[in-house]
Image (tube, rainbow, N blue to C red):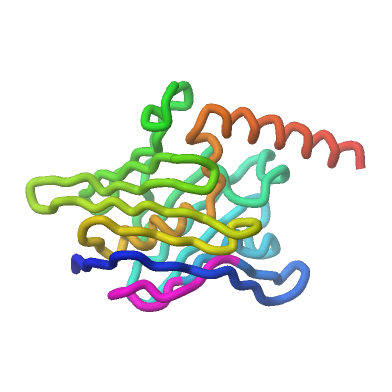
Amino acid sequence: MHTAVGEFTLEFWKEGRTHERRSGLRGTVPGFGEVVLTAPLPLEHTPGSLVSEVRGPSIPTAVFETRGIHTEATDLPTLNGSTLRVGDAMVYLRRNRFGLTHRARALRFRYGGDQYLLRAVNRKRFVLVRRADDEDAGVTLTARLSGFGGKRLTVRTTGRAVAADISLAVLFAGVDRAPLTRSGAVRAALGRSTRLFAESQA
């Protein structure tokens, strides 16, 4: 079902203690009801990986997972060594790591017969586009994280969205999107190296 959503906002939440602590963003999306992002899931439940997950009664569950030694030096799953699942489908991701512009470095993938593109605007803003085709005019979701630590997500929707659009836009708020910009990729690499070195000396 295609729905004119307009703008919606999700707010920060957290619950539990220590190893069982969960946190993320939650709120109500017009036409789709409650949406909850957990970013990341408690590490005790996902050994060796970092996982962010979106759930809601009217959207497909979406999961973004990263595996590898670099997960020890980051707080959210990254675009490197990652997998994306939407519902029961595994989604193949592709991007040009050597692209010179934000658009060239954008993440591209296909789900449910639709072509998607995720590009960064800056560290706290990103755009998810479901491309138009012969049957659909497509949709653009412009997302902005605000507040200390990104504790509020505001998404503006242009066009009529389907449930998967909502799942994906919210999910990518719980992913380290730094590699989508050249400067972000450099900062992220330096930060991971420094953190891994510090932990190796502890």
Left or right for 188, reference 55: right
Q: Nearer the viewer, residue 84 or 47?
A: 84
Left or right for 161, reference 66: left
Left or right for 5, reference 56: left
Q: Quadrant of residue 164?
A: bottom left
Position of the N terminus by quadrant: bottom left
Position of the C terminus by quadrant: top right
Q: Which residues are magenta?
A: 24-35
- 146 w.r.t. 70: above or below: below
Instruction: Tell whether position 30 is magenta.
Output: yes
Instruction: Tell whether position 151 is magenta.
Output: no
Q: Quadrant of residue 38?
A: bottom right
- 55 w.r.t. 175: above or below: below
Question: Where in the figure is residue 74, as x and y percent of width and height?
Answer: 68, 46
Q: Nearer the viewer, residue 46 or 62?
A: 62
**Residue sitting at x 44%, y 60%:** 170
For the question of whether residue 81 can be seen, the reply is no
Q: Quadrant of residue 69?
A: top right
**Residue sitting at x 72%, y 43%:** 73
Question: Where in the figure is residue 53, as x and y percent of width and height?
Answer: 50, 62
Question: Where in the figure is residue 81, as x and y percent of width and height?
Answer: 54, 39
Tell me which secondary structure the magenta stretch mostly adopts: strand
**Residue sitting at x 49%, y 61%:** 153
**Residue sitting at x 42%, y 54%:** 143
